[in-house]
C-alpha cells in the first residue's frame, strides 16, 4: 500500500514557513484519488479501532485543530476522516465570529470550555488561531476585543499571542492532551473555483456569502498572517502540518494518516483487569449462569471470564 511521508508536510519547528515552498496541488506519492482510496480506507478502519481503545483507556485526550481559508475543505475533512469513529468519542466545535458574551472574556475562554476530556477526540473547526488570522488581517475586528491599551501595542500583540498560545498548548500536552494542527493549504484559483461551485450548486448555496468573496480581496494578508503563525506556533509538542488542499481526496488521506500515526504512537491499551477484578467478574458470571426460570448454564460463562484477555484489535 502506498504510504505518505508525514515529514514532508510538517512545518518544522523553528524554521520560517514560506507558503510558496508548499505546493497546494501536491498529492504526495499518490497518482490519483483511486490510488489513494486503499490507504484512506485502511486508515479509517485503523482509526476506529484505535479510538475504541483510546476511549476505554481515558488516559489521553486528542485535540485536532483545523484551519484554512474558506472552501479549504475543513468540514469535508472532518466528515470523511471521522466516518467510522464512534460518535460518543468525538466532539466537534466550530468557532464563528465571537458572540457579545465571548467578547467580555479573554479570547481563549470560549475554546477552553470545548477542550476534550481524556478519552475523547476534540476537533476544532477553526479555533483561537483565528485570533492570529482574521483578527490580524482586520484591525476593526481586533478593536472589538477592547483590550487594555498596553495589550494592543503594535508589534507586540502578535508575539504575545504566539507566546501565550504556545504556552497553553505545552501545558495541555504536559497534562495528557495531544495537540495536532492542520493548515489546509489552498490555492487562490482553487478557492475561486470552489466558491463558484457554491454559487452554481443549489445544495451548496447556503455555504456562500458575500463576505467570503470580499475576504478573497485580503488573500495576500491572510497568506502572510498564516506564514507568521505557522512559523511561530509549530512546536514539537503541538506541530502544524501544512496539508495541500487543492485536491480534497489528498487532504483527507493526509489528515487521516497523521491522526492514525499519532494514536499509534501512544501505545494504547485497554484497561487491564487485575486478578482481584477477574475473581469478581467470575463471581458475577456465576450469577449470570442462572436463567430467569431457575435453570443453569453449564459453567461456560465463568470459564470465559477467566480466560478472556483484552484484545488490541478493537473488536468487542
Ligand atoms: P465559517 O467557518 O465559514 O462558518 O465562518 C466562520 C467565520 O467566523 C469566519 O469568517 C471566521 O473568520 C470567523 N471567526 C472565527 N473565529 C473568529 C474570531 N476569533 N474572531 C473573528 N472572527 C472569527
Ligand atoms: Mg464559510
Image (cartoon, rainbow, N blue to C red):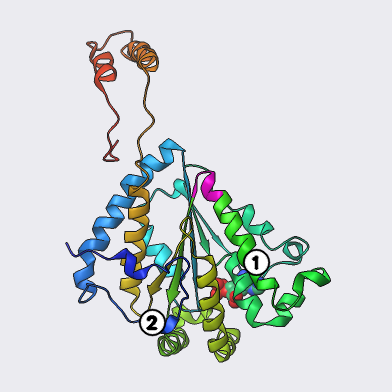
Q: Residue at image x 59%, y 53%?
A: 114
In the depicted view, which residue is nearer to us: 176 or 31? 176
Quadrant housing residue 209: bottom right
Residue at the extreme front: 14
Badge 1 marks a residue whose secondary structure is: helix
Q: Quadrant of the C terminus?
A: top left
What percent of the width, then of the height, locates residue 198? 46, 84
Q: Earlier in the sequence, mark 1 or mark 2?
A: 2
Few, some or many residues within 10 Å of mark 1 (<14, 14–19, 20+): some
- Residue drawn where x is 73% and y is 81% of the image: 140
Horizontal and vertical percent position of residue 124 = 53, 61
- In percent of width and height, residue 46 lies at 28, 51
Q: Is 173 contained in the magenta span?
A: yes
Please tell me which residue lies in front, 242 or 302: 242
Q: Which residue is mark 1?
A: 161
Circle count: 2
Residue 216, visible in the rendered structure: yes
Residue 291 against residue 204 in the figure, above or below? above
Q: Please give the residue where the numbered disc 2 appears in the rendered image.
A: 21
* Helix, strand or loop under label 2: helix
Instruction: Tell me if residue 146 can be seen.
Output: no
Which of the image's four quarters has the N terminus?
A: bottom left
The residue segment tinted magenta is 172-177
Q: Left or right: where does residue 37 sit relative to residue 152?
A: left
Task: Indicate the quadrant where residue 240 lies.
Answer: bottom left
Amino acid at each position: 500500500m502506498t504510504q505518505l511521508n508525514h515529514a514532508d508536510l510538517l512545518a518544522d519547528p523553528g524554521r520560517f514557513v514560506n507558503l510558496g515552498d508548499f505546493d497546494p496541488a501536491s498529492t504526495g506519492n499518490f497518482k490519483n484519488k483511486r490510488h489513494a482510496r486503499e490507504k484512506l480506507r485502511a486508515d479509517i478502519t485503523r482509526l476506529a479501532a484505535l479510538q475504541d481503545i483510546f476511549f476505554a483507556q481515558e488516559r489521553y485526550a486528542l485535540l485536532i485543530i483545523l484551519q484554512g481559508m474558506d472552501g479549504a475543505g475543513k468540514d469535508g475533512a472532518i466528515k470523511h476522516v471521522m466516518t467510522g469513529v464512534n460518535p460518543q468519542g468525538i466532539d466537534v466545535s466550530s468557532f464563528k465570529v465571537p458572540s457579545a458574551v465571548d467578547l467580555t472574556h479573554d479570547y481563549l475562554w470560549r475554546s477552553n470550555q470545548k477542550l476534550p476530556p481524556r478519552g475523547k477526540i476534540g476537533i476544532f473547526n477553526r479555533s483561537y488561531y483565528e485570533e492570529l488570522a482574521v483578527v490580524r488581517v482586520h484591525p476593526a475586528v481586533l478593536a472589538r476585543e477592547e483590550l487594555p491599551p498596553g495589550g494592543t501595542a503594535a508589534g507586540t500583540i502578535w508575539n504575545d499571542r504566539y507566546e501565550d498560545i504556545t504556552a497553553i498548548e505545552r501545558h495541555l500536552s504536559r497534562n495528557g492532551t495531544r495537540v495536532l494542527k492542520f493548515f489546509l493549504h489552498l490555492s487562490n484559483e482553487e478557492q475561486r473555483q470552489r466558491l463558484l461551485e457554491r454559487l452554481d450548486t443549489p445544495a451548496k448555496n447556503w455555504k456562500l456569502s458575500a463576505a467570503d468573496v470580499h475576504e478573497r480581496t485580503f488573500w495576500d494578508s491572510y497568506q502572510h498572517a498564516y506564514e507568521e503563525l505557522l512559523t511561530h506556533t509549530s512546536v514539537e509538542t503541538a506541530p502544524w502540518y501544512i496539508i495541500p488542499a487543492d485536491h480534497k481526496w489528498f487532504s483527507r488521506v493526509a489528515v487521516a494518516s497523521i491522526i492514525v500515526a499519532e494514536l499509534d504512537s501512544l501505545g494504547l491499551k485497554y484497561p487491564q483487569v487485575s486478578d482481584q477484578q477477574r475473581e469478581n467478574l467470575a463471581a458475577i458470571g456465576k450469577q449470570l449462569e442462572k436463567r430467569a426460570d431457575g435453570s443453569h448454564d453449564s459453567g461456560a460463562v465463568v470459564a470465559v471470564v477467566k480466560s478472556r484477555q483484552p484484545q488490541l484489535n478493537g473488536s468487542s
